Amino acid sequence: MSAMQVVFLVLAVVAVGSAVGVVTSRNIFYSALLLIACLFTVAGFYILLEAAFLAAVQVLVYVGAIAVLIIFAVMLTERMMGETKHPWNEQWSVALLVAVALVAVMLYVVINGNWQVSDAATPTDAIVALGQTLLSTYVLPFEVASVILLMALIGAIIIAREERPIGLAGEEQEGED
Amino acid sequence: MIPLSWFLIVAAILFCIGLYGALARRSAIGILMGIELMLNAVNINLVAFWRYVTPEVLTGQVFAIFVITVAAAEAAIGLALIISIFRNRETVVVEDMDMMKW
Amino acid sequence: MENLVKLVPFIPIVPLLTFTIIVVFTNRNKKLSSYLAVAAIFITFLLSMVIVLNAVIRMPHFAEEPAVHLTLLRIPTGATTLDIGVQIDPLTVALLFMVPTVCLMIFIYSIGYMEGDPRYSRFFAYICLFATGMLGLVVADNLLLLFVSWEIMGLCSYLLIGFWFEKPEAMWAGLKAFITTRIGDVLLMLGMMILYFQTGALRFETVFEGVEHLAETNPNLMLITALLVFGGAVGKSAQFPLHVWLPDAMEGPTPVSALIHAATMVAAGVFLVARMLPIFVVLAGMPALIWVAAIGAFTALFASTIAIAQDDIKRVLAYSTISQLGYMIMALGIGGFVAAVFHLITHAFFKALLFLGSGSVIHGVETNDMMEMGGLRRKMPYTFWTFLAGMLALAGVPPLAGFWSKDEILATAFVENRVVWVMGTIAAFITAFYMTRLVCLTFFGQARNKEIHAHESPPVMYVPLIILAIGAVLLGFLGVPADFPILGPLLGNNPFHHFLAEQFHHWHYVALPHVEFNIQVMLISIVMALGGIGLGYLLYGRKPLVAGQRDPLERMGIIWTVLRNKYYVDEIYRATIIRGTVGLADLFFRFDLGIIDGIVNLVGKLTERWSWISRLFDVYVLDGIVNGVGRVTSVVGQELRYIQTGRVQNYMIIVVISVLLLVGVFLYI
């Protein structure tokens, strides 16, 4: 067993463990924090897969933005320190069954799959290559993604802002704050 | 060399854990977190396949970047929605939001 | 003659046109209608006289020539044709002499008699149509035209008897006449059909040739056919047992009684037998003729006995007509063809005269009941003297016409069939008796009903009487037997006999007896006639009855009652035939009502039941299915809606389960 494999195994254990913690924790806040841990391990996976830029992006965006956003939301919406009775809804047994079945199926496919592994090397200057690919071959999805982000931006603001009472059609009150 | 199947196994497990979370959690934010787990698992899959099947073409990474982008947008919207609902209903328990029921 | 025969079709057509014109155009104008009718008959009279004179001039060869034909219509009937046409032969000419003359007299008389009647024009229209029928009958050369004319006359008889249809008696009398003669008509039609089938033709000459063969091959059928044809004559000429309609027919106006029921229509039956004599004679032994003679003789005697007990002047004359027709039929039955036709012609004149005279009496006295009359001799002289002439003619007093014709019949009977002669002679006695009774009750003595103020009729009525009386007196001289001392040769050796005797000489199987002049028979006839008159005078004339006095003959008691009630024949018919027919009709009616209506109603009910079942099917099955579909959908929906929990996670898990299933399927198949 090489050093890489050991690292991988450690990362794998941490990832799975924190993921389990995310979905089973009674405290939302703990779930959020465990989610951050999981995300970090995923970044580690990216490094193992020689996708350094992606690992950096993962940490910056996922952990830095999304996870933080989740924590904001948690704080804004729930009693922080309290433990909920139990975090499961009524169909948890079925969900468990389904998840187990699915994982069984997927493991079966993965293990019995004939993956054609190639020995080629990754591009030397990955980031440059990435930038070029993004703006040449995938320029359209790139633009679309930017539009999505714009929409999300605007949408989130509108959805989440304070409501102001609006009068009936034709009548618009000057709002009092 | 780490075999590809290992990565795929881990991704599969993470995906199913995330699926369980999305299906079984009461809190809306919990569901969202499950979804984030699923997305991450998919990303791992994508990058692993890129690395081991077609490393010279960066399609896998690009795809993963887009996934992250969309995940971010979706998380933003989702959380905005949750906050908005919380303002109206004082709860984020998904079970209580069943006005579209029979 | 071949050219003259072209005139013949006009003889019946002119009155037909007049009928149409009166009906369509001149119905409102009474005077015009009557003048048109008289003019039409006058034209017919002229045409007929042309033909008659022509025939008389060519006598005696005329009789030996074959009849002259004119075919008007040829109807193709398969391989053969049916020829409809007219003919001129001795019999036709004889009738063409009598019919238009008598019709003319009666038409003129009617102008006066029917004065004031609201349906004046219609009357003349009807008698024109009737004239068409009678004339068509006379000139026809085939059974079809004869039958059609026969029926036209029957129709007119019905219409004219019931002319005053406001009177229920008149209406019923018309119906009775029509129905009774219908029985005879049906028999005649059956006879006609058999003849047509057996001989293949309806033309007289062809039929006469064909029946020879039929008589040899199937004598029974021949006899039946002859009797069927005779049945028509029995009905139309009011012989027993179909005589019951004629007395009731007196409900019609008197000109009608004179024209139809004395002179012409009732003579049609006699004419028919005379015309068709070959079919009666063709059978060896002539059994058909025996029937004819028997019925004729019986009727003659039977009717005359009824006549002596009637009070209605027209009834007496009606029964007298029946009796005289019996004479004619009887004469034909014993082979006295010429005698029968001779009597037909003379009878037409004096019977028409008698009826018109009685009409004149009724017009003046306004009652038919002789018991109410009396003493009219002085008040109605023209009527009286002409009536007397007619009565003497009828009674058979020489030298008037009736004597010669009746004597010829009796002379033939004496030779051919003694029984018939006896019956005829007795009937002659009775005839003279009742006519004397009639004349005495009507004209002699004092008026029994002081209320009645009798007056003579206008000239338009008594002039025809005079003309007819001349005929009644003089016509007989045409038929004086050739062997009669002095008068016979003087008057041409019985020209009438010569004229008619060869009518059938083309059919060798018709052998008519030649009658020798027999002085004994003549004397006995004279004695009978005078004896009857004497008895009548004794009872009614010497001391004419006064008001309230009963008829002397009532001393006969039960016989008187039976005679007065016409032997109860009508009552017997009503109890048996009429009740039977009505009962049968009722039975059929009830059958129709019960069974046929029952079937119809049953079908209706079954349909109703079926529709009820259909409705059940529709409601429960079909509607059930339709509703069921709806209900199933509703129920299913109601059960399935719980899937919609409103919770996203439930939906998601279903998605995932579905995906798993699909993956499973994909993996293992």
Image: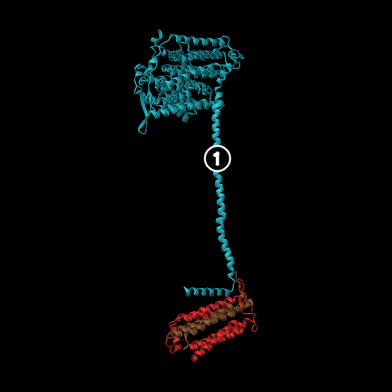
Chain colours: A red, B brown, C cyan
**In this view of the protein, which residue sits in the foreground, B66 or C623?**
C623
Q: Residue at x 56, y 50 (%)?
A: C613
Q: Is the residue C652 above or below the residue C93 in the image?
A: below
Above or below, C248 against C596 in this view is above
Q: Name the residue under label 1.
A: C597
Disc tally is 1
Secondary structure beneath label 1: helix
- Look at label 1 and name its amino acid: Asp
Q: Is residue C43 left or right of residue A161?
A: left
x and y percentages locating residue A33 in the rendered image: 59, 86
**Can residue C532 be seen in the rendering of this structure?**
yes
Rendered location of residue C286, percent (x, y): 41, 20
Picture quadrant of residue C279: top left
In percent of width and height, residue A46 lies at: 50, 87
Q: In this view, does C385 lie above or below C9?
A: above
Can you give x and y, in whole percent of width and height, for residue C667 in the image? 48, 75
Residue C522 sits in quarter: top left
